Amino acid sequence: MAKKGNRLILGLLCSVCNNFNYITERNRVNTTEKLKMQKYCKACKKKTEHKETTKLK
């Protein structure tokens, strides 16, 4: 049976190289703004800002 609720599955893109690196989820009721996180990018080989995208590749 599928999950029900306010959780939204999304992907995180590197803001430097636009590489798709992570998949995560967020609660759309508690967190209304888009996510921005400092994560490690394998292509850049350093910690960069990753932004939320709803289009999963």
Image: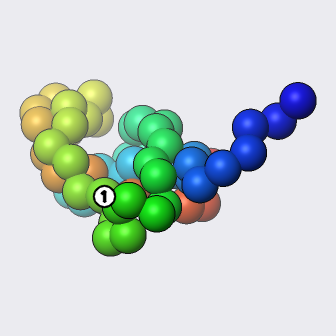
**Nearest the eye: 45 or 34:** 34
Q: Position of residue 39 (x, y in %)?
A: 20, 37
Q: Is residue 18 visible?
A: no
Name the quadrant containing residue 47: top left
Residue at 55 percent across and 61 percent down: it is: 54
Q: Position of residue 35 (x, y in %)?
A: 31, 58
**Nearest the eye: 31 or 18:** 31
Quick one: SS at disc 1?
loop
**Nearest the eye: 33 or 47:** 33
Q: Is residue 19 visible?
A: yes
Q: How is the image coloured?
A: rainbow
Is 52 positioned to the left or the right of 25 in the image?
left
Residue at 27 percent across and 29 percent down: it is: 42
* Number of numbered labels in the structure image: 1
Name the quadrant containing residue 4: top right
Disc 1 marks which residue? 35
Q: Amino acid at mark 1?
A: Leu
Question: As displayed, is residue 37 above or below residue 46?
Answer: below
Counting other residues with Cα less than 10 Å from the Cα at mark 1, is it few (<14), some (14-19), or many (20 or more)?
some
Residue at the far right: name it: 1
**Nearest the eye: 19 or 55:** 55
Is 15 positioned to the left or the right of 46 in the image?
right
Is 37 positioned to the left or the right of 11 in the image?
left
Q: Position of residue 29 (x, y in %)?
A: 46, 63
Task: Name the quarter where the N terminus is drawn.
Answer: top right
Residue at the far bottom: name it: 33
Residue at 35 percent across and 61 percent down: it is: 31
